[in-house]
Amino acid sequence: LPHQFRQASALLDHIETYDHQAYFVGGCVRDLLLNRHIGDIDIATSATPDVIQQIFSKIIPVGLEHGTVIVRYQHQSYEVTTFRLDGDYSDQRHPDAVQFVQTINQDLKRRDFTINAMAMDKNGNIIDPFNGREDLQKGIIRTVGNGHDRLIEDPLRIMRALRFSSQLGFKIEDETLRAMSGLSDEIETIAVERIVQEAAKFFAGAYVKTGMLYFESIGITNHLPILKDHPHIMEQIPKQIKPLKSFATVIAMFHVTEPGISIHQWAKQWKCSNKIKHEASVLSQALQHYQHDGLDRWLVYHLPANRYSDFATLVYMLFADVISEESIQKIATALPIYSKQDLAINGTELRRLFPDRGAGPWIGDILDQIEKQVVSGRLDNKKNMLKEWIKWNPPVTD
Ligand code: ATP
Ligand code: MG
């Protein structure tokens, strides 16, 4: 077993000493069998949250109402969830009360897809009542039980099926796919925040191009914010879509494709954080700049280093130009300054140069101009040079 699992085995042991069952479950088992990078290790147990809280010293009661406790164990965090029936999908049909059950098989039955409905004990034995392993081998996404019933129960699963197809490159099994098409309007009953979480993983998937075919074919675009009111957007987005690693990149792509819809609108209707909204603006401004002036110093100056790869991906998708991260990096390294603070002159000194003028917007204006000159290489960032420049380009009198 990989070391993450070996470390966590001690936690399973500990639960078992209290005469309770405990298993690795869900995504970590799937990813282990696929030899993929393993994210979080989730644990399912017959012990109730009360018991878990008593037998571990460091716990965070994150989702007691769903039977979930985070356990800190040997400097790692684990989500430990009591075996339960479906019940946390709180819509009208499902009262919020969670119902605990006795066996791992009952718990696996509530899970969405066969590939996510496997458990593993501490010795590496796989519990697989729905033939998830076979579907993993064949590369198939299939609901546990009747597709229609399971998707009605929690329509977010429609988005989840799409995101797993995009992450894993799997085919969606026929009955599941038919149910997805028939129920795509049900996605409108789901909180946008939950949809965005899955959508972000969808667009970041290594096989997003495959996923996209399903995305469009099941008609879900007619039921997602903004896309439902502007059906032409989907036709315009590039066919050679690449994995987009952050949701900001997704929004930037949509915005540059259809500039009529502002970043602000996207962020609002898709309920994004201000951070994502800001990152999307930075990216789309860089793309617009690129369209007019190409990859120059001014563009790179405004692009944070951790956005180079997203930017290069979008340039490739939208304008079919190949630019490497290294070429951006090379320009960045040669920049004379990295922010206004690096200018060899500041506002206070400017005021001293023009003692008869008070504080005012003229200071910012001059600094903006100097910044442009210095970044573009037309002016040396030396105090005497800057002063000279200002002498020839004095602030306009208002
Ligand atoms: P990732 O690696 O992206 O986290 P994951 O499979 O762990 O993938 P999660 O959203 O973290 O996905 O969910 C953990 C597990 O909980 C899933 O593998 C699945 O068994 C179950 N699950 C999650 N969401 C649902 C849902 N909406 N309906 C049914 N089961 C779900
Ligand atoms: Mg997970």
Image: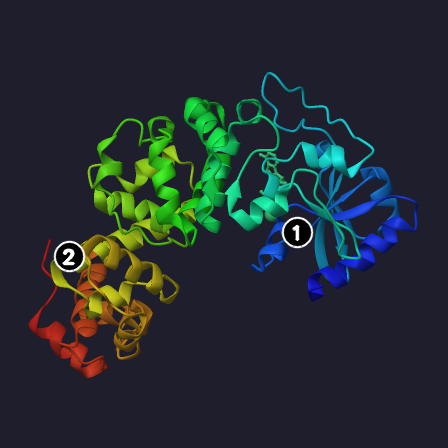
Taking the spot 29% from the left edge, 74% from the top edge, the residue there is 332
Badge 2 crowding class, 10 Å Cα cut-off, few under 14, some 14 to 19, many 20 or more, is few
Taking the spot 16% from the left edge, 81% from the top edge, the residue there is 385
Which residue lies under the disc numbered 1? Answer: 29
Lateral position of residue 98 relative to residue 270, left or right:
right
Residue 79 is situated, as x and y percent measured from the top left of the image, at 70, 47
As drawn, the residue found furthest toward the top would be 92
Dot 2: element: helix
Picture mark count: 2
Mark yes or no: residue 261 visible: no
Determine which quarter of the picture holds residue 306. Answer: bottom left
Residue 30 is situated, as x and y percent measured from the top left of the image, at 61, 50
Dot 1: element: helix
Location of residue 231 with respect to 5 vertically, above or below: above
Lateral position of residue 288 relative to residue 38, left or right:
left
Residue 356 is situated, as x and y percent measured from the top left of the image, at 17, 64
- Asked if marks 1 and 2 touch (Cβ < 8 Å), the reply is no
Q: The residue under label 2 is which amino acid type?
A: Gln
Determine which quarter of the picture holds residue 52. Answer: top right
The span from disc 1 to disc 2 (Cα, nearest Å) is 45 Å
Q: Nearer the viewer, mark 1 or mark 2?
A: 1
Query: Which numbered marker is on residue 291?
Result: 2
As drawn, the residue found furthest toward the left would be 392
Location of residue 170 with respect to 173 vertically, above or below: below
